[in-house]
Amino acid sequence: VISAAAETRGQDLLAGAIAGDVASVSQLISALESDGEVGRGIRTDLHAAGGRAHVIGITGAPGSGKSTLVGAIAGVLRARGLRVGIIAVDPSSSISGGAILGDRIRMQQHVLDPGIYLRSMSSRGWLGGVSRATVDAVAVLDAAGWDVVFVETVGVGQAEVEIVGIAQTVAVVSVPGLGDDIQAIKAGLLEVADIHVVNKEDRPDANKTIAELVNMLNLVELDPDGWAVPVHGTVATTGAGVERLADLFGEHRDWLVESGRLQQREARAARSRINAIAKDIVVDRLYDLEFRHELDSAVDRVVAREVDPYSAAQTLIRRVAGE
Ligand SMILES: Nc1nc2c(ncn2[C@@H]2O[C@H](COP(=O)(O)OP(=O)(O)OP(=O)(O)O)[C@@H](O)[C@H]2O)c(=O)[nH]1
Ligand SMILES: [Mg+2]
């Protein structure tokens, strides 16, 4: 049950966010993150208000220039009159002050611009690949009318591959000269990319890295109706290639809409979120005090081999569902 005061507070924050008040955006994201009454009370309205933003995932090796690149693209999009949100997902289990400070410095040119919203969050509590807090932050910016929302994650594992779950467009950032392996392949990210970016094109061997990526993509079985994945070079620090990259994002979004793939992606994302949330609800219920004793005795009986873990789980779920 959610109190009327909490409902009103959530609605005020959402209204403030829609009116462009950055403090309301932050407070709403925090309310959802802490999962209290205010956050829970606003979910329906928040979801109903969303669905327009272009959500772009940026992933790739640590230090490949993702934050610098996002800052540069944000500048280009601002000049085109768009509002840009940036969610930087910190790879460490807790947000380190250093990483946030670094991002703030790289985004410094934008801190006074109310049309750019930057938030760093930890990747704790991954749920269906993407942390609930990240999904919620994207939802707030979307509902509040931000045109483009970037989600930056470090491509180091399966969790980052799942960025596809919330992003409409995924860019994988590689850099020249990190050994002979193509970083995108090593991280399992070759096929999730809608756009491959080779950043630090000012470094030696950039052309070689671009050619290698193009070759690798040619080996991947092509969907004749699919999107032709571009490999694009940039120098994030000078802005070279960044205008074109912003265009490529727009072209990909247009393609998604025209081909009907946007709806497919959204259906897939909705399905995986419902799955993850449903599992969460059941598991949370199992740990409620009400079922604590039954859970403990199931544990004992499985250990004693009186019952197998599948049957024990099934029995508990029936109990939780009130059957
Ligand atoms: N030479 C060169 N350096 C770059 C370029 N882009 C970024 N850098 C530098 O690379 C370093 C890392 O940049 P970040 O933007 O922090 O990279 P990141 O991928 O966000 O890093 P993490 O979030 O820590 O994984 C910084 O010192 C940047 O100035 C580029 O195009 N050329
Ligand atoms: Mg970064």
Image (cartoon, rainbow, N blue to C red):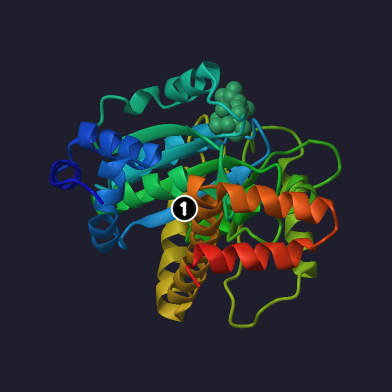
When the figure is inspected, residue 240 is found, relative to residue 303, above or below; the finding is above
- Tell me which amino acid carries mark 1: Ile
Residue 236, can we see it?
no
When the figure is inspected, residue 102 is found, relative to residue 4, above or below; the finding is above
Which of the two residues, 162 or 81, is positioned nearer the viewer here? Answer: 162
Instruction: Classify mark 1: residues with Cα within 10 Å, few (<14), some (14-19) or many (20+).
Output: many
Q: Quadrant of ligand 2?
A: top right
Residue 98, can we see it?
yes
- Left or right relative to 131: residue 50: left
Residue 260 spot, x, y in % from top left: 44, 80
Question: Dot 1: what SS?
Answer: strand
Which of the two residues, 286 or 264, is positioned nearer the viewer here? Answer: 286
Task: Please tell me which residue is depicted at 74% across the width and 34% down the height of the picture.
Answer: 204
Task: Please tell me which residue is depicted at 46% across the width and 73% down the height of the picture.
Answer: 267
Q: Circle 1 is placed at which residue position? A: 56
Residue 156 spot, x, y in % from top left: 70, 42
Task: Please tell me which residue is depicted at 54% across the width and 50% down the height of the picture.
Answer: 130
Q: Does the residue labelled 1 lie within 8 Å of ligand 1?
A: no
- Left or right relative to 46: residue 125: right
